[in-house]
Image: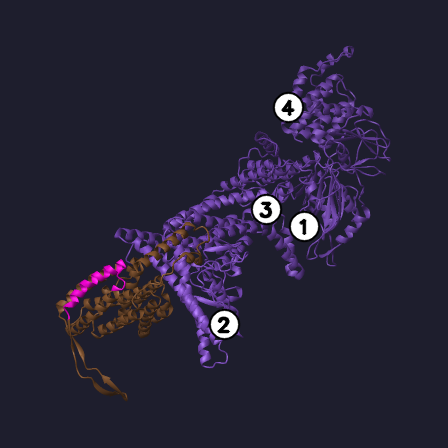
Chain colours: A purple, B brown
């Protein structure tokens, strides 16, 4: 207490004391006692002298007015004193907190009560002070009655509690029976500031926090206090607080944890047999050395992790199995800040509020946020960006407070807080703890993991749970008792005194030095062996404690907060994410420059002019168009991944907190995706516009854009998947190459599918299965097919060229190949070869001729070989060979004539297009601008060594894939050769471009579903479990994974 | 004959039209179209005859070998520029120019110009692909062979046999018109190079003699071309060749008969024909022929 305040108090005391009858001996004694508690001997004298001088001043005048003759008339307090009182009270107002003011007021009453002089003058002074202190009339009255009255019926207020041996029948006040108690303890609760005062009616041997108390005084019954009677059960602060809460308007929440145990997959035990039983309105500390499982416990209690054994019940509802029923009841404030770094203090709180309160209008929300900001002392810095730990914009204390505010605004019934004070100054720590303490006043249950609390903070707790190595619960109960309990067990002197009698300090460190004390060896060195093992502590604890385990009637749980509907959540998430991204200029600039810069670099570098003597760029001669198409898919993939890969990871902390809000995961994901898709769409547009125009790819902007966008969108979802599954940014960026490189390799651009390892399907009829699962392969194929088939030049010829190509293939290669087998047979027969034709070759002939027979034209033109059933090893003969040859000749003739017709038709068409020099020029322009020779080589596979290959006993066409329709037309087969112009889908032919786009989006949907159910993460956890079983080393990794695999999701 | 072809084209055009009108759907299957297409077997000059006549046209290797022996100076400018390929959009032009490039290729190979050769090789190959006869040029082998001047013989052989096979195949496939054009292309380019080379007197005469001998070849060519004159492109070319024919008319070839003798060569008795032709040609005529050839040749390569 400062000198100034003390002086002011002395003045106040004096003003009251000198009223009417004047200062009495009792009053003076009271002041002296009061001063003795605050000051040392010499200072007491000094202030007492000051008090005396104040109380004597103006006394003569008052003595006149206080003439006994006119004593029966009510006398008014002098104006001078009133004004003085007002001045002093205002001065006090400026420096003292509301709690302190209430204490001052109680002291004033005490002073008045010391002589039972409740005269109107005196009371007027007290009233004035109370008014200035902003203490309500009801509370004032309650305090007055509490101080002055002993009779129970006069104290029938809801804020009063009696502790005595016999029952009383008051309507409003509370009662605790204590049969051993001599006399009566009266407790007053000052609701507005959550303070309890205590007085006893008779002298007794009661000890308050180990110190004797007298019936002459009123004591503050602070948090964590214990009142002990010589031969009765001690009365704890929490008992009293609970009594007041039990029937207040707040819904009573009962929280029980029974026999909680947690064993990790690697058999490491995290928690053993933990029991907790708590009610609303309490604050519980979870303490213990490092690594004893405090955070694990809080994770289990809050429902983040499932216990291996035991159950956690909230009002009888199993937390882990009936999550649906306790939506929104639990709040969690982890150790790290859960703030959106790029948003301001205000915005952070604003979005949290919007997510929690559906019904509030914008104005109401703003008001609410402002109110919370003010109560947190953050109003001044509300427009500051939060920043991150390395790039601090607001101080650590402010971050913590804001962090707290995010939960406070929601007011969950049960709140878990993990180390709220770590890294904070003691001042900030106390502020934070005060905030939490205030929650309990409003009937919340608060669990706090805390490490090395200061005495002040330690005493704030109602109960403390102490854990020891290996997850043993070794203490659960009153914090001050804890000190005594361990001291006793350690056989220390003064073991029944919890706090320092002079200063009221408690040193929780004593507990830990006792718990963890080590054996000293014969040389006086401490060894690593503990004096008392955790198991032993645990045994002591269990011997002494049994939970009531009583089954009670539970209130229905309070309605969960009113969260917005799916769409509104989406909107809130969306705008929060959007603003946070927009606030990050670097991110925005880089993202929107990335695509155009890459496009420019890429396109400009590969803008190649074939003719060394010319400066004119001709699209047709640019050899790099195919690689460009390939790069489009890779850039799209890369850009899409980069944009999203850290997105959920960055949000993981916020998600962890919001997981308690039971918000819709899909609306969160949709908000993410909509923003990412918008970014990707813009990137795609910029990239394609710039890249294509530099390279002179004319038209088809939409198709190019669609492919780029589709791949990017898929990459966005993939990125979200990895960002949701992995625990660090580094891992995420290590994962990206794993996603990109196989896609590069298996696109079909860098390595021909014909020339990859045959074990994974290289050189076969269709695209290898392993490549089918590469989105880029579909994208690249779509781009190539689209560019080749749909450009303005080829568009005019494609369908005839396709026919021409098919007839050409059949005529030149296919029939000739078949003929070869038969002719070879004939030659071998001539030379009397023992095996003129192999079984396989016969089967091949059979297969291929059957195929030809089944072609529609065969029937129409009656070019059918009707002895196919003779084509078998037994019936194969010279006669049959001759017949086959005749048939093949007919067939070839048919193909040849058709080829010639189509070839000529094309030639006619071109001739007509180049019939005049002007037309010729136009044609040339069209050709140069739209057709690309090298892409055509690629699409037509002209460099293939074999135009057709044999696969088992069938012939597979290898040239002109772009002109070859899917061969496998069964209903469900959609796989084709690479660069097929159409895809078979349910027996219909769909243009490859659209089909492939659909496939990419199908991948996207699958990836989304995986993301929604967090499949990748589950898989990783499964792997971690398996490896945990396998080896000790990897087992460690599993713990690690388990530990930090915080549920970052809803 | 003309009518028949016309009908087939009309049908084809209809077919194509119906195709392009339903491009969205998968109707572009060969077989569908075929049902509506009239198959026309064209009536033409006997394929065998065409084949024989074509083989009477000297192949570029013969001409180039002679040039090399004559010690002429290699001149890149004489060749058809590589980039001209972009002008060859129709089968007509492609066929002629595949011949032209073929001759250029041989000419270059003889002078060991292997780097430039690659480009000509790729042009030949590309035109062959456009004509759908790419199977006769094993591009990879040729490419490999061209890397070293020691392989010239092989390259020449493959190129030459490639051309021969291609011609034979085209005739067989009833695309004799293209075979004629290819042969014409090789021939006109040979004449062009021969007439435009800078050379020294004694060799000049030999070369001139060979040029004069082409009189009969030209007659054959015109005869062949006439089979296809209903094609306007052919008709135009024939008109140009008639002008050239006029220049060649000035060349006189006299046939001197000598008794055949019987000789023993390598232990075999052979009847040797001692008759020979005498070609009468002077430099003026050569120059005029050169001018005419240049006009035709420049027309076809551009």
- Check the image and report above or below for A388 versus A122: below
Q: CA distance from mark 2 to mark 3?
A: 63 Å
- Check the image and report above or below for B186 versus A42: below
- Provide the residue designation for mark 3: A652
Q: Position of residue A411 (x, y in %)?
A: 66, 36
Q: CA distance from mark 4 to mark 2?
A: 111 Å
Chain identity of mark 3:
A
First-in-chain label (1 vs 4): 4
Q: Secondary structure at mark 4?
A: helix
Q: Are marks 1 and 2 on the same chain?
A: yes
Residue drawn 49% across the image and 51% down it: A997
First-in-chain label (3 vs 1): 1
Q: Are marks 4 and 3 on the same chain?
A: yes
- Mark 1 or mark 2: which is in front? 2
First-in-chain label (2 vs 3): 3
Answer few, some or many: residues within 10 Å of disc 3's Cα (few below 14, many 20 plus, some between 14 and 19). many
Q: Position of residue A626 (x, y in %)?
A: 41, 57
Q: Position of residue A981 (x, y in %)?
A: 45, 56
Work out whether residue A353 or residue B179 is closer to the camera in this orientation and state it. Answer: B179
Residue drawn 36% across the image and 56% down it: A622
Q: In the image, is residue B245 part of the stretch drawn in magenta?
A: yes
Which of the labelled discs sits on residue A290, or is there none? 1
- Mark 4 or mark 2: which is in front? 2
Chain identity of mark 2:
A
Q: In the image, is residue A270 part of the stretch drawn in magenta?
A: no
- Provide the residue designation for mark 2: A841
Q: Secondary structure at mark 2?
A: helix
- Provide the residue designation for mark 4: A90
């Amino acid at each position: 207490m400062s000198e100034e305040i003390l002086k002011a108090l002395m003045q106040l005391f004096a003003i009251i004391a000198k009223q009417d009858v004047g200062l009495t001996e009792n009053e003076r004694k009271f002041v002296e006692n009061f001063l003795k508690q605050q000051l040392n001997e010499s200072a007491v004298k000094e202030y007492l002298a000051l008090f005396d001088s104040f109380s004597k001043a103006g006394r003569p005048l008052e003595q006149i007015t206080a003439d006994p003759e006119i004593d029966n008339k009510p006398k008014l307090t002098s104006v001078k004193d009133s004004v003085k009182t007002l001045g002093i009270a205002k001065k006090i107002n400026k420096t003292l907190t509301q709690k302190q003011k209430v204490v001052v007021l109680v002291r004033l009453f005490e002073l008045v009560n010391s002589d039972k002089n409740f005269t109107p003058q005196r009371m007027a002074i007290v009233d004035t002070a109370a008014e200035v202190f902003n203490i309500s009339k009801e509370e004032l009255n309650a305090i007055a009655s509490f101080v002055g009255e002993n009779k129970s019926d006069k104290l029938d207020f809801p804020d009063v509690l009696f502790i005595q041996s016999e029952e009383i029948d008051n309507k409003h006040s509370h009662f605790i029976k204590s049969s051993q108690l001599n006399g009566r303890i009266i407790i007053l609760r000052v609701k507005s500031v959550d303070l309890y005062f205590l007085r006893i009616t008779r002298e007794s041997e009661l000890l308050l926090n180990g110190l004797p108390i007298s019936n002459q005084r009123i004591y503050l019954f602070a948090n964590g206090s214990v009142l002990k009677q010589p031969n009765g059960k001690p009365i704890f602060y929490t008992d009293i607080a609970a009594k007041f809460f039990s029937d207040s308007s707040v819904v009573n929440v009962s929280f029980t944890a029974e026999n909680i145990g947690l064993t990790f997959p690697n058999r490491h035990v995290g928690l053993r047999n933990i029991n907790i039983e708590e009610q609303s309105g309490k604050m519980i500390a979870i303490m213990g050395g490092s690594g004893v499982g405090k955070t694990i416990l809080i994770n289990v209690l809050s429902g983040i992790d499932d216990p291996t054994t035991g159950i956690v019940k909230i009002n009888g509802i199993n937390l882990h199995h009936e999550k649906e029923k306790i939506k929104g009841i639990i709040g969690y404030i982890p150790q790290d800040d859960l703030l959106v770094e790029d948003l301001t203090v205000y915005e952070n709180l604003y979005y949290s509020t919007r997510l929690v309160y559906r019904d509030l209008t914008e104005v109401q929300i703003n008001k609410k946020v402002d109110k919370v900001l003010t109560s947190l002392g953050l109003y001044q810095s509300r427009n500051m960006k939060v920043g991150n730990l390395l790039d601090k914009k607001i101080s650590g204390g402010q971050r913590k407070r804001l962090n707290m505010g995010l939960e406070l605004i929601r007011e969950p019934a049960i709140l878990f807080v993990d180390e709220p004070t770590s890294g904070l100054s003691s001042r900030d720590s106390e502020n934070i703890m005060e905030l939490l303490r205030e929650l309990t006043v409003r009937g919340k249950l608060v669990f706090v993991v805390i490490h090395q609390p200061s005495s002040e903070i330690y005493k704030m707790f109602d109960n403390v749970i102490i854990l020891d190595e290996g997850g043993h619960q070794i203490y659960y109960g009153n914090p001050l008792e804890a000190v005594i309990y361990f001291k006793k067990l350690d056989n220390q002197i003064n073991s029944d005194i919890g706090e320092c009698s002079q200063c009221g300090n408690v040193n929780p460190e004593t507990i830990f030095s006792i718990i963890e004390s080590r054996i000293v060896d014969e040389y006086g060195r401490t060894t690593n062996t503990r004096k008392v093992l955790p198991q032993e502590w645990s045994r002591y604890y269990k011997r002494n404690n049994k939970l009531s385990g009583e089954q009670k009637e539970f209130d229905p749980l309070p309605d969960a907060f009113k969260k917005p509907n799916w769409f509104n959540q989406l909107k809130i998430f969306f705008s929060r994410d959007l603003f946070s991204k927009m606030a990050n200029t670097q991110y925005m600039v880089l993202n929107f420059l990335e695509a155009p810069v890459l496009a420019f670099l890429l396109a400009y570098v590969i803008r190649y002019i074939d003719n060394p003597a010319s400066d004119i760029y001709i699209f047709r001669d640019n050899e790099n168009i195919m690689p460009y198409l390939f790069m489009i898919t890779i850039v799209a993939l890369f850009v899409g991944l980069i944009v999203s890969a850290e997105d959920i990871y960055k949000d993981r902390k916020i998600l962890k907190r919001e997981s308690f809000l039971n918000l819709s995961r899909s609306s969160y994901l949709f908000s993410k995706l909509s923003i990412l898709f918008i970014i990707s769409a813009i990137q795609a547009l910029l990239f394609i516009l710039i890249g294509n125009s530099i390279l002179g790819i004319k038209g088809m902007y939409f198709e190019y854009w669609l492919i780029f966008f589709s791949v990017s969108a898929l990459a966005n979802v993939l990125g979200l998947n990895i960002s949701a599954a992995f625990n660090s940014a580094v891992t995420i960026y290590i994962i990206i190459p794993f996603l990109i490189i196989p896609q590069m390799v298996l696109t079909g651009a860098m390595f021909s599918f014909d020339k990859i390892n045959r074990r994974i399907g290289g050189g076969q009829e269709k695209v290898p299965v392993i490549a089918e699962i590469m989105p880029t392969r579909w994208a690249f194929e779509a781009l190539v097919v689209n560019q080749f088939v749909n450009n303005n030049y080829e568009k005019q010829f494609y369908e005839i060229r396709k026919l021409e190509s098919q007839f050409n293939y059949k005529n030149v290669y296919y029939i000739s190949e078949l003929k070869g087998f038969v002719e070879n047979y004939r030659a071998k027969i001539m030379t009397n070869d023992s095996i003129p034709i192999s079984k396989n070759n016969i089967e091949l002939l059979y297969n291929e001729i059957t195929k030809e027979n089944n072609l529609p034209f065969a029937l129409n033109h009656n070019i059918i070989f009707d002895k196919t059933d003779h084509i078998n090893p037994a019936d194969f003969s010279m006669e049959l060979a001759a017949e086959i040859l005749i048939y093949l000749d007919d067939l070839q003739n048919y193909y040849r004539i058709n080829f010639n017709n189509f070839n000529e038709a094309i030639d006619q068409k071109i001739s007509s297009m180049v019939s005049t020099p002007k037309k010729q020029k136009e044609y040339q322009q069209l050709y140069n601008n739209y057709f690309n020779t090298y892409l055509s080589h690629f699409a037509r596979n002209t460099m293939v060594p074999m135009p057709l290959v044999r696969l088992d006993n069938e012939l597979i066409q290898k040239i002109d894939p772009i002109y070859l329709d899917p061969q496998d037309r069964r209903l469900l087969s959609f796989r084709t050769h690479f660069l097929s112009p159409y895809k078979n889908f349910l027996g219909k032919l769909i243009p490859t471009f659209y089909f492939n786009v659909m496939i990419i989006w199908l991948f996207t949907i699958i990836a989304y579903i995986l993301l929604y159910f967090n499949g990748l993460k589950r898989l990783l956890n499964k792997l971690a479990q398996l490896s945990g079983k396998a080896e000790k080393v990897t087992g460690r990794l599993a713990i690690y994974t388990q530990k930090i695999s915080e549920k970052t999701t809803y | 004959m003309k009518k028949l072809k016309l009908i087939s084209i009309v049908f084809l055009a209809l077919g194509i039209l119906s195709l392009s009108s339903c491009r969205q759907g998968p109707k572009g299957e060969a077989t569908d179209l075929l049902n509506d297409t009239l198959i026309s077997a064209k009536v033409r000059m006997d394929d065998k005859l065409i084949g024989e006549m074509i083989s009477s046209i000297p192949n570029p290797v013969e001409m180039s070998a002679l040039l090399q022996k004559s010690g002429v100076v290699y001149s890149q400018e004489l060749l058809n520029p590589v980039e001209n390929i972009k002008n060859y959009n129709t089968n007509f032009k492609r066929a002629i120019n595949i011949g032209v490039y073929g001759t250029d290729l041989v000419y270059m190979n003889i002078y060991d110009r292997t780097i430039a050769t690659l480009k000509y090789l790729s042009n030949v190959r590309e035109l062959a692909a456009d004509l759908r006869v790419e199977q006769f040029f094993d591009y990879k082998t040729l490419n490999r062979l061209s890397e070293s001047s020691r392989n010239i013989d092989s390259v020449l052989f493959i190129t030459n046999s490639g051309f021969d096979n291609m011609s034979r195949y085209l005739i067989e496939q009833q695309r004799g018109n293209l075979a004629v054009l290819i042969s014409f292309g090789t021939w006109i380019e040979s004449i062009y190079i021969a007439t435009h080379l800078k050379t020294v007197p004694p060799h000049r005469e030999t070369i001139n003699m060979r040029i004069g001998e082409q009189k009969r070849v030209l007659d054959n060519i015109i005869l062949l071309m006439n089979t296809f004159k209903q094609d306007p492109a052919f008709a135009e070319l024939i008109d140009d060749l008639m002008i050239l024919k006029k220049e060649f008319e000035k060349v006189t070839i006299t046939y001197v008969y000598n008794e055949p003798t019987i000789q023993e060569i390598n232990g075999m008795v052979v009847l040797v024909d001692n008759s020979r032709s005498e070609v009468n040609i002077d430099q003026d005529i050569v120059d005029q022929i050169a001018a005419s050839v240049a006009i035709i040749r420049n027309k076809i390569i551009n």
